[in-house]
Structure formats: C-alpha cells, structure tokens
Amino acid sequence: MIGYGFMGRAHSNAWRQVRSFFDVPYEPVLKVICGRNESEVKKVADRFCWESFSTNWEEVVTREDVDVVDICSPGYTHAPIAIAAAQAGKILFCEKPLANTLSEAEQMLDAAQKNGCVHMICHNYRRAPAVSLARQLIEAGEIGNIYHYRATYLQEWLRNPEFPTRWRLDKSQAGSGALGDLFSHSTDLARYLVGEISEVSAMLHTFVDDRPVLNSSDRAHVDVDDAALSLVKFEHGAIGTIEATRYATGRKNFNRFEINGRNGSLAFNLERMNELEFYSDEGPNSGFKTIQATDKQHPFLCGWWPPGHIIGYEHTFTHTVLELLQALTEKRLPIPNFEDGVKNQRVLDAVERSAASRTWELVNR
Ligand SMILES: NC(=O)c1ccc[n+]([C@@H]2O[C@H](COP(=O)([O-])OP(=O)(O)OC[C@H]3O[C@@H](n4cnc5c(N)ncnc54)[C@H](O)[C@@H]3O)[C@@H](O)[C@H]2O)c1
C-alpha cells in the first residue's frame, strides 16, 4: 500500500478486518506499506501489523510478493503509481478522485486495460449500508421515476483564513480543491443512484488565496477552489444540484443527498450513516420514515453485529475491499472501477470548463 496517512490507516484497517467478518476465500496479507518519511512509516507499519515498510513506491509496485497495489497517496501520485503497477501486472485499488486530470485518469484506465489488470476506485460511500439500501429501493421501483438529485457535501476545516496550507490546497498536488475532494463523492453517488450526468452549469470559488505555511513564516498561494457548486442535468431527464465546500461553519462531514421520485423520496446524511429516510405514497402517507439500516437483511449487515449495534465510517472501506475480493472470486471487474473513475472525472472536467466559460457544458464532448 502506498501512503500511510488518513486513508492509509482506513485501508490498513479494512484489509485486516474483511476476512474476520465476511466469508471470502482470500486471506489478505499486509506485505508492505510505503511512505516518504522512514521513521513515520515504520511506526504505522508496526501499529497496523504490516510485514515491512518502504520509502520507495517504484520498488513496491514491482515486488513479486505483492498482488494488489492500494494507492492512498495524494492525487498527483495516482497516475504514475497506477501506470507502473499496471505495467507490473498488479491488481489496482486507487483512492478517489482517480487522478488530478481527465487525461491522467484516461491513461490509468488505458494502462490497466492494456495490461489486463483488475482495477477498482475507492468510492466507499456507495457501501454505507443505507446508501446501498437506497439503491436497492430505487432499483425495486419504490420511488418511481426520479425527478431530483440534491447533494451537499459540507465541511468547515478551512473557514479560519490562518489555517496553514497543505497538499490539498496546491493544484499541482491535489488537482483541485473541494471539487476533487468532496464534490467527486457526490457525483459518484449521483451516478450510482440516479444515472449519468450529461450537462453542468457550475461555479468554483476560492475565498482565501493566501495561507501560512506550517512551522514557517512563509505564506503560500492557494490555487484550488474552496467551494464547488453546480446545476446538473441527467441523461434520463432528472435534474439536480451539487454543492461542496470546506467553509460550511459548523458542518463536519455533512455528506447528504435527497432524491425525489414520482412515488417517493429518499434522503441520507453520512453524519447519521446508519439511517435512511424514506417517503412513499404507499401506506399511511404520514411523511418521511427513518429506516435504521442495521438489520441482517440490509446490505453488508450479515457480517456485523446484531440489529441496532451500529457501524461506522471505517466499515465502508471494509465493504469496499470486500467487493474487490468478491469480484476476484467471481472473475469480474469490481464496481466502481477505473471506468467509473474516468466517467466521474469527465463530470469534474465539465464543471471546471463550465466555471471558466460561465456557460452550460456537456459532460461527454
Ligand atoms: N474515500 C474517502 O473517503 C477519502 C477520504 C480522504 C482522502 N481520500 C483520498 O485518499 C488520498 C490520500 O488522502 P489522505 O487524506 O489520506 O492524505 P494524507 O496527507 O493524510 O496522506 C497521504 C500519504 O501519502 C504519502 N505520500 C505522499 N507522497 C508519496 C510518495 N511519493 N510516495 C509514497 N508515499 C507518499 C504521505 O507520506 C502520506 O502518508 C487522496 O487521493 C484523497 O482524495 C479519500
């Protein structure tokens, strides 16, 4: 695995956990974890029980005892690592967004396909049980033809203008700001639950373009968006709004969507991730009801605790790794994979074009 930061820890946990709770014919072995700082990566390797550590990803992706390369590093590293790992014939598992640009994402997909690699992108929110349940209800026709998708992904961690800069605020490393970081999750859920987005009318905004550098008297220019907003049209006729920001004072990880159909509606908020709000014209018609998605028949819950013993954010990664292992067993591509990553990146690309042109832009030009 490349990257031992926030996501590296979540993925380490998922790989260790998946076989303890789910019936899979594979026993993941945590072979090598890679970072840039030797003493730090050593600490994480010890804590998460990795067999070895490295500070050289080129060496890691060609190791013979490595089958899966799990990419948890900043966006600018995704394409070179994934392409080298594809050329070495590895199974590719990559954090979102797939890359910093559409062109890089396409090159990653191309390399994976040319080398016959299994590939997957980690859009873990699909695998919150309540979100998977929403998809099941939509597929079963419970809310009917969809009219609206309304998504907000709100965080607050940048609202202090003196919060120091980091790689996420540097376009050369992150590709974009709230757009790739948060908005990309909402577009992935839009594609998963509603369908392909065909057209966007968007704006990107930066509130603070100059921030202190940590442990230094220097300051750094911020060249990514702080907030991304778009009107969207879907191929089959639904319309929507998507808003992502890191300046929503008081909001921590408010990843919410609401979907309104002809006969019913669904709403989800990650901050209450075990719950799905459901309105249906069927029955007593007394407004939205809250389904606690923790019963054994709900997606993924067969592996966990008795009903009501809720699960959390980290389990969405375990479920994502589970999908990868199940796909390997069934000799199919996992979902979502790099093709989804490219389609998602086309939406992000259209958002950037629309923000620049101040007009509606087609997603598939
Ligand atoms: N799916 C999610 O919910 C979710 C949440 C947060 C981040 N992410 C994604 O995960 C990725 C990493 O984000 P993060 O928040 O974990 O970042 P982070 O800054 O916490 O960690 C990044 C890690 O990458 C390592 N790294 C950087 N360059 C490297 C290199 N050249 N070689 C080896 N290691 C290198 C760093 O040492 C660090 O350990 C990004 O793509 C981000 O968008 C996904």
Image: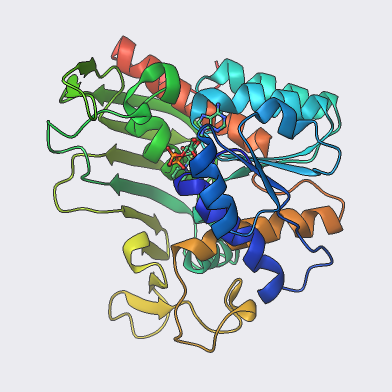
Report the side of 311 relative to 63 (left or right). Answer: left
Q: Residue at horizontal 84%, vertical 44%?
A: 65
**Which residue extends farthest bottom?**
306
Residue 140 in percent (x, y) is at 59, 67
Residue 110 in percent (x, y) is at 74, 22
| Quarter of the figure with residue 231 | top left
The quarter in which the N terminus is drawn is: top right
| Above or below: residue 233 compared with residue 224 | below
Residue 143 in percent (x, y) is at 47, 64
| Quarter of the figure with residue 292 | bottom left
Q: Residue at horizontal 74%, vertical 24%?
A: 84
Q: How is the image coloured?
A: rainbow
| Above or below: residue 290 compared with residue 73 | below
Residue 347 in percent (x, y) is at 48, 28
| Above or below: residue 229 compared with residue 349 | below
**Camera-side residue of 23 and 151:** 23
Residue 8, visible in the rendered structure: yes
Residue 189, visible in the rendered structure: no
The quarter in which the C terminus is drawn is: top right
